[in-house]
Amino acid sequence: MQTARELAEGFEKRRAGRVDAGDVRENLAELAAAGVTVGAIKDAAERRAVLATVAAGCGATAFKLAETFSAGMAYGTLYDAAVRLGLAQRAYEIAVERVKTRGFEVTGLPGTQFAVSRMRSSLATMVALLDRQALRAAADGAVGLAEACVAHLYVAPEADSVVSTAFSVISGDSEGTVRLSQIWHDLKAVSAPVSGDLARELVGKNAVGIDPTETPRWL
Amino acid sequence: MKTKVDYVALAHELAPRFAERARQHDADSSFPHENMAELVSSGYTAMTVPAEFGGDNATLAELCEAQQILAGGCASTAFAVNMHVHGLAMIARLGGASAEWACRAVVDGAVISGGFSEPGVGGNWWHPTTRAEEVDGGFKLNGFKGFFTGFPGATHLFLSAATLDDRGLPQPMAFLVPKPEQGVRVVGEWDAAGMRATGSHSLALEDLYIEDKWSVGERGTLPMLFMMGVHWAWCSFASCFVGIARAALDHVVATQQKRIISVIGKPNAHLPGIQFRIAEMAAKVAAARAHLEAAINAEHDDVDPLAHYIDMSVMKSSVTKLAHEVVTLGMQVQGGSGLSSADPLQRMYRDVVAGLLVPPATDVVQEWAGKQALGVPIFAEPRWVG
């Protein structure tokens, strides 16, 4: 984890001020050279933690790394959610860090405080949910995938919301906005392994006891 | 040797009977005395009594799961008894004489209701406006209590008041006293849109004499005691509302699995719109349960009291908001029939709103959590810039 954290900090610094997706290939090579690979990290919880950490430095790199970690759609969905969580966590850190540099004139505003609290609350729920659903996603087949999709259905829009709130919190801070723009781009530029609509279908059918392979699909 | 009661199984046994009575109590705004009697006779009310005083010393996780199940049957009953089970857990963990007598009384059938909310305090429970004047052998209390949940079924009252120190500053105190025959007057019967059977009356305390022996904890330490035990309060509060959300999801799913509209000839559950909204409900229920479970399993002892209080408060705010969203979505799935008085969903819809309103006050949580994250002193003045 320490290695991943240090590398992620490097990825973020190297990407400073740029509008592209970052040096994904080079980043992945550095991670591989440091032993952050699918072969070296066997535990699913550790993989999620590594993905969230790498995402803090470069989301595109983390999404690519997630692809190499994935063993099936359920885990792929959880890993994708872990990357989105990591991006949201980094947006929160940046917002807090940047706004603190502006002093009590800004941190002393109730709107700032309430927004930061909402982000914090949302992140705490996301972390807990991802841990919970990871255990449940171990179930076989459609049920396991539906459990993973439960996490994604919540985490994906919440991550967007946290980053969006971060923009509001640091409003007027151009340097911070550039970094948040990279995070926003990372969130939006990569499609989830299971789309939101398909996730809703799978979770909904699982809840009401309908086989998702049944035809006709709907009435 | 006494066999430990499985309180979650007991809640599963009791909840269906409570659900049958819930509609009438909701309609009448009547207190469910028969439910409370069953909770006492079954030993449910003694769940948080430590083993040395004859109880089962139920864990926070057991309490919260049992309360969720109970709330799924009758949220009012669950919320009324919640004041008792979590309040007792907090008192028991203080130790000392008051803990011992309170626990032994509960094993013998005592029921506690709690009163910390006051008109004009705005959720700032650590600033009680009820005054405790020192008199010979005890205190004389004067003030008002709002939302004294469970009052009609209580044998004992757990309430707060403040003495004034020699500088004239308030020192919050707590008392646990057998329900007095004099000095407490119901000034407002509970008649609300939701949680109608909780008996959350408004009380006037008028020269209420309380002997010294009924005080709990050291004078002035109430805020610290509460912060250190706050997980019992906010996790159990949240559990009642998660329980409503879980029951709403189950109810909506069961209805949509059975309801057949003639033009499609199959249950509504086959419709994409129904599935999508149920999926959203399921995701929010899972999120609420996850955050609650994380709070239940968090470190509670070796903690900074204020940070602990804020973490638990953030959880309660997040979880009750999610529970409210779940039931609101459920109403959309259920359609017009969900508004019918015959459908328990409309009661859940009214009950779950209370989760947004019960302590801790959301605005205070947001202020404190935001300030803590930003490194702004929480109690410093000026409170805000400008």
Image (spheres, coloured by chain):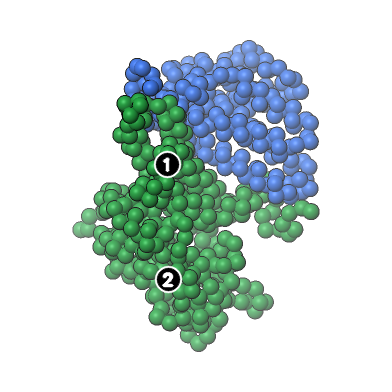
Chain colours: A blue, B green
Residue A210 shows up from this direction: yes
- From the top left corner, tell me how far across and down residue A23 is, in percent: 67, 15
* Crowdedness near tag 2: few (<14), some (14–19) or many (≥20) residues, C-alpha within 10 Å: many
Q: Residue flagged by tag 1: what amino acid is it?
A: Gly
Residue drawn at x 77%, y 48% as measured from the top left: A104
Q: Residue flagged by tag 2: what amino acid is it?
A: Leu
In the rendered image, the quadrant that contains the N terminus of chain B is bottom left
- From the top left corner, tell me how far across and down residue B9 is, in percent: 27, 48
Q: Is residue B235 above or below residue B157?
A: above
Residue B222 shows up from this direction: no
Considering every residue shown, the one lying at the far left of the view is B1
Check disc 2 and report its element: helix, strand or loop.
strand
Q: Which mark is residue B336?
A: 1
Q: Is residue B69 left or right of residue B306?
A: left
Residue drawn at x 40%, y 80% as measured from the top left: B181
- Report the residue marked by disc 2: B157
Query: Of the residues under marks 2 and 1, which one precedes in the sequence?
Result: 2
Q: Is residue B251 left or right of residue A59?
A: left
- From the top left corner, tell me how far across and down residue B118 is, in percent: 55, 67
- From the top left corner, tell me how far across and down residue B95 is, in percent: 42, 66
To which quarter of the image does residue B46 belong? bottom left
